Amino acid sequence: MTCAQAQPLLSAYVDRELDITKSLEAEDHIRECKACAATLQQHEALRSALGAASLAFVPPAGLERRVRKAVRHEAKPRVLLARAPWRWAAVPMAATLAAALTWSIAMHREGTRGNDVVMNELVSGHIRSLMADHLVDVATSDQHTVKPWFNGKVDFAPPVTDFTASGFPLVGGRVDYIAGRPAAVLVYRRRQHVVNVFIWPSAQQEAEALRNVTFDTYHLVRWSASGLTFWAVSDVSDADLESLAHLFQNPT
Ligand SMILES: [Zn+2]
């Protein structure tokens, strides 16, 4: 990537709006290029100034729902095309196809969107949280602080438990946007690794057993309980992710 290619992307990079391939390319360039690194710092300074409480815009109630409805209505075909998984040049085609096939049945059950798209966004969200210094919005291992922090930010109550005693200390939480809906994200550490657990309301009420999938080099484990869908994403082993999932399923 050249400076001329990198410069127009820096603002979107700071706002974490680039897809994963572009993000990594931009990051490679920024690491090598002092000029673009300086521009990036300016964008970051501007972003944090705009994020200050006195300037933050508080949207009126219902705005998000209206915008999402309008976007779904107007742009559905384009959104689906733009988010097709094969723009991921870095993902081997065979792996993508295998993942798509494995999940095609679940896709129909989920209804609205394919799980391959969801997994793409989950892995992107996981990587973004690691490289853009945006791991958590509320940084504490205190479950009694993290749980109420989600009030008013998502319209469901994610279960929040610190599993330090079982080797998964809670780092904090944040809200992400996955496949067109807000997701509560709980962040745990496993030794030196980060596990993101994405949570949103499930399409069906009945609990679903664990399912494993590997997407790119990342492991994902999905399950449902109490009307919520959970996706744990990390580069730790499947066994580690399953242990964390079992802790969620039997927190006591
Ligand atoms: Zn440059």
Image (spheres, grey):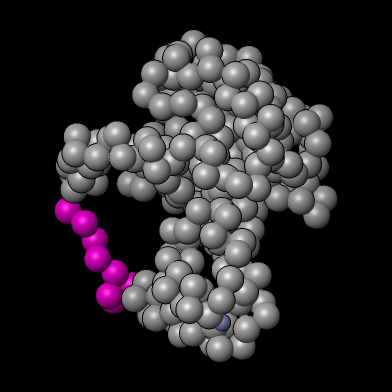
Which corner quadrant of the image does residue 47 belong to? Answer: bottom left
The quarter of the image that holds ligand 1 is bottom right
Name the residue at 73% across, 41% down. 217
Quadrant position of the C terminus in the picture = top right
Q: Is residue 44 left or right of residue 35?
A: left
| Residue 236 counted in the magenta span | no
Q: Position of residue 146 (x, y in %)?
A: 52, 49
Which corner quadrant of the image does residue 211 belong to? Answer: top right
User: What segment is highlighted magenta in the picture?
Assistant: 53-61
Q: Position of residue 116 (x, y in %)?
A: 53, 30
Quadrant position of the N terminus in the picture = bottom right
Name the residue at 46% across, 37% down. 84
Q: Position of residue 189 (x, y in %)?
A: 73, 49
Name the residue at 33% across, 46% down. 152
Q: Chief secondary structure of the magenta span? A: loop
Name the residue at 49% across, 34% down. 117
